[in-house]
Each structure stands twice: as structure tokens, then as C-alpha cells.
Image: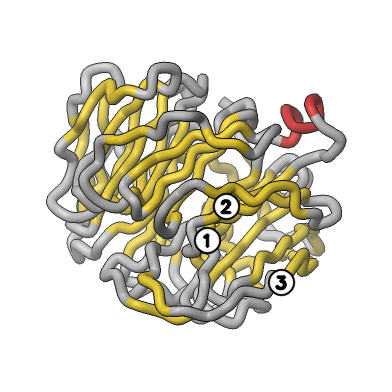
């Protein structure tokens, strides 16, 4: 595993607004709100980058990113020039979550219509048969590293593991006692993490469906999103007490708590990222006050506070190879942020 030398450098992020899409206002239920509050307007609820290398091999653009919206559509843009490549239509209700397959050729989307759809990215067309089985809204999706499995979390409190080729449920996990807010695969696909409004984070054996570990903080705040660290040793979790916590799930303890953002109402996500010639690591998160916060993984210091959005930032992802961040939220804008560094301070080591 790669050993990262983390330096307390100031992380500077230069904002470049890619597009603001005109959309009509209307009443809808915000699919990223754990309490299903009603809001005005169409929200961008999730943001995900594709794999740049795979797309470069099959098309003229370097990489692309996508956003699902509460108007039941998905939009795919080209990162370099902001060109809109596809508008994907097929769901009957708002879309809360999306996931790229590892080869970037397939896209999965989860909707309030209780279905999961797979899409051919090159054509923008859906696969003929949706994945059906959940009894309520689909909140979260993640592909396995090989792309042969898909894990889903739902408002019905269950976690399903799907065979992508056949479209059938391989395993149904009665995971939580509240809606499942987040799911993720570890980098080798052997473990799954899930989290929910019951305040629990659970680690599952992919092959057997056995729950190997349950993580819960003493405050027992609802957990809305979860991600494995790049090396698979830790789990990063977002909670509705305005905290992002890094867990050593093997030992069952919280090792870092990142604070400074606002998160008490909406389901907000974030990501790991790298900077300083890819030798330093940071955690980045959206916030309900329209800000984006980046922390040093080791020191927990706030490296940068980004302003630009005019409402809660719900979806966020990083593209480490090009040191880019994409964000979207209730202000109906998508923003691309480019990172660069200035200044050197004291260094620490951490293996993430």
C-alpha cells in the first residue's frame, strides 16, 4: 500500500463555473433529505466523475461527469468544455443516486420510482429491463471494483447486492432500522459498508452477507453517507450533527472527526482527494450553507473553504488524476474546481 507524506500545505482551489442550467420551479420532494422535506426547484442531488482513462480510449473527450436531478433526468457533461453530452430519461420520479461502472461504459441510477436503471453511456440509452426489488426510494448505489456487482441502499431499510449481468438480486441484507443513506464497496470488492438514519455503520462480507462489524458513535447521529478510504483500512462517514468521521472499522473506533461545515438537515456527501503532486490527502465535503470544506486527513486542519453555491451543496466528487472537484446542489448549478498548492509547512505521514 502506498505511504503518503502529508504536509500542512495550504490547498488552494481555483473555481471555474462550468454551467448554470435554466430550470422551471415547481414543488417536489427533495430526495436527498432524510426527512423528505419539500423544497422549491429542481435540485442536483449527486455528482460523480467517470474514469478519465477509459473514456479517453473510447471517445474524443478526456473525462466527463454527471448529475442526477429531481426532475427524473440525468445529465452527462464533458469536463474540459462543459459540453452537455447526454440527457438520460426513463425514470418516473426524482433520482437520488448514480454510480459509474469501473470501465465508465455503464451508468447505474436509483430513483424514487423504486427502480434501478443501467444505462449505456455511449448511446445514452437505458438497458431494456430495470432492476426491481426494493419497496421504497433508492438512496445509494455503488459498483464493485470489477463491475460485476452493484450494491444498493433504500428507504425500505434494506441493502441489496445485484448481479449486473443478470439483473438479479444475489443477496438481500436486512441491514438497518431506518432508511439506508449510503453504501460502498471496498477496493477489492470483498467488503460492503452501509449506513443509515439509525446512526449505525455496518461492514458486510460480500460473499456471505454476514455483518462483520457495527460502528456507532456515542452521539448516535443519523449517518447519511459512507466511503471506504483508498487503501480500504478506514471508512469515512457523514452524520447529521455537522461532523465527518474517519473510522478504523477493524478496531471499531473513530480516529478522526472533521468539523467546520453545516449538516443537520440534508443528506450530504463528499470524497477523499489528493494534492501536492498527489503526495498529500484531504477530505472534502459539501455544506448546507453553500460552502465546500477541505480538511487535511491527518491534522484535521481546514485547508480551504470554497464559496460559490447559493444553497446546500448536496453532491460532490473528486477526480484525483486531474485534481478536480465537481459539486452540485439546490441552487441548480454544477461547479468544477481545480486544485493547486502554495506554501510548505511541517509534514506528517499517514497510510490511507
The alpha-carbon separation of the residues under discs 1 and 2 comes to 6 Å
Q: Nearer the viewer, residue 234 or 72?
A: 72
**Residue 49 screen position, x and y as percent:** 64, 45
Name the secondary structure under disc 1.
loop
Q: Residue at 35% across / 43% down in the picture?
A: 115
**Residue under pointer 1:** 69
Indicate which disc, 1 or 2, sits on the residue closer to the N terminus. Answer: 1
Indicate which disc, 1 or 3, sits on the residue closer to the N terminus. Answer: 3
**Label number found at residue 20:** 3
The alpha-carbon separation of the residues under discs 3 and 2 comes to 15 Å
Displayed quadrant of residue 267: bottom left
Using a 10 Å C-alpha cutoff, classify the residue at mark 1 as few (fewer than 14 neighbours), some (14 to 19) or many (20 or more): many
Residue 207, compared with residue 263, is above or below; it is above
Residue 44, compared with residue 47, is above or below; it is below
Indicate which disc, 3 or 2, sits on the residue closer to the N terminus. Answer: 3
Q: Residue at 58% across / 69% down in the picture?
A: 292
Q: Residue at 75% across / 30% down in the picture?
A: 53
Using a 10 Å C-alpha cutoff, classify the residue at mark 2 as few (fewer than 14 neighbours), some (14 to 19) or many (20 or more): many
**Label number found at residue 74:** 2
Name the secondary structure under disc 2.
strand
Displayed quadrant of residue 153: top left
Asked if marks 1 and 2 touch (Cβ < 8 Å), the reply is yes
Decide if residue 39 is on the left or right side of residue 55. left
Q: Answer whether residue 351 is visible to the viewer in this image.
A: no
Viewer-nearest of labels 3 and 2? Answer: 2
Q: Answer whether residue 80 is visible to the viewer in this image.
A: yes
**Residue 90 screen position, x and y as percent:** 49, 46
**Residue 111 screen position, x and y as percent:** 39, 51
Amino acid at each position: 500500500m502506498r505511504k503518503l507524506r502529508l504536509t500542512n500545505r495550504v490547498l488552494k482551489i481555483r473555481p471555474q463555473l462550468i454551467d448554470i442550467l435554466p430550470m422551471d420551479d415547481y414543488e417536489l420532494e427533495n430526495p436527498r433529505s432524510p426527512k423528505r422535506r419539500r423544497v422549491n426547484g429542481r435540485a442536483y442531488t449527486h455528482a460523480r466523475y467517470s474514469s478519465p482513462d477509459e473514456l479517453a480510449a473510447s471517445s474524443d473527450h478526456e473525462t466527463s461527469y454527471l448529475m442526477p436531478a429531481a426532475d427524473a433526468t440525468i445529465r452527462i457533461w464533458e469536463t474540459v468544455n462543459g459540453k452537455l453530452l447526454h440527457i438520460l430519461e426513463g425514470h418516473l420520479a426524482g433520482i437520488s443516486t448514480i454510480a459509474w461502472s469501473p470501465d465508465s461504459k455503464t451508468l447505474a441510477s436509483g430513483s424514487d420510482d423504486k427502480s434501478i436503471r443501467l444505462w449505456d453511456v455511449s448511446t445514452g440509452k437505458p438497458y431494456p429491463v430495470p432492476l426491481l426489488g426494493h419497496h421504497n426510494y433508492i438512496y445509494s448505489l455503488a459498483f464493485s471494483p470489477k463491475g460485476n456487482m452493484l450494491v444498493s441502499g433504500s428507504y425500505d431499510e434494506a441493502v441489496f447486492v445485484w448481479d449486473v449481468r443478470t439483473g438479479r438480486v444475489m443477496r438481500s441484507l436486512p441491514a438497518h432500522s431506518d432508511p439506508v443513506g449510503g453504501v460502498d464497496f471496498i477496493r477489492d470488492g470483498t467488503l460492503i459498508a452501509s449506513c443509515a438514519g439509525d446512526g449505525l455503520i455496518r461492514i458486510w462480507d460480500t460473499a456471505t452477507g454476514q455483518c462483520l462489524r457495527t460502528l456507532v458513535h456515542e452521539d448516535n447521529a443519523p449517518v447519511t453517507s459512507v466511503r471506504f478510504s483508498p487503501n480500504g483500512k478506514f471508512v469515512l462517514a457523514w452524520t447529521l450533527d455537522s461532523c465527518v468521521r474517519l473510522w478504523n472499522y477493524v478496531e471499531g473506533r473513530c480516529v478522526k472527526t472533521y468539523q467546520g461545515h453545516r449538516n443537520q438537515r440534508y443528506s450530504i456527501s463528499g470524497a477523499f482527494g489528493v494534492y501536492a503532486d498527489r503526495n498529500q490527502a484531504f477530505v472534502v465535503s459539501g455544506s448546507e450553507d453553500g460552502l465546500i470544506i477541505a480538511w487535511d486527513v491527518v491534522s484535521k486542519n481546514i485547508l480551504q473553504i470554497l464559496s460559490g453555491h447559493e444553497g446546500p451543496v448536496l453532491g460532490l466528487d473528486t477526480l484525483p488524476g486531474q485534481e478536480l472537484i465537481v459539486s452540485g446542489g439546490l441552487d441548480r448549478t454544477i461547479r468544477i474546481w481545480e486544485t493547486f498548492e502554495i506554501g510548505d509547512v511541517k509534514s506528517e505521514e499517514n497510510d490511507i
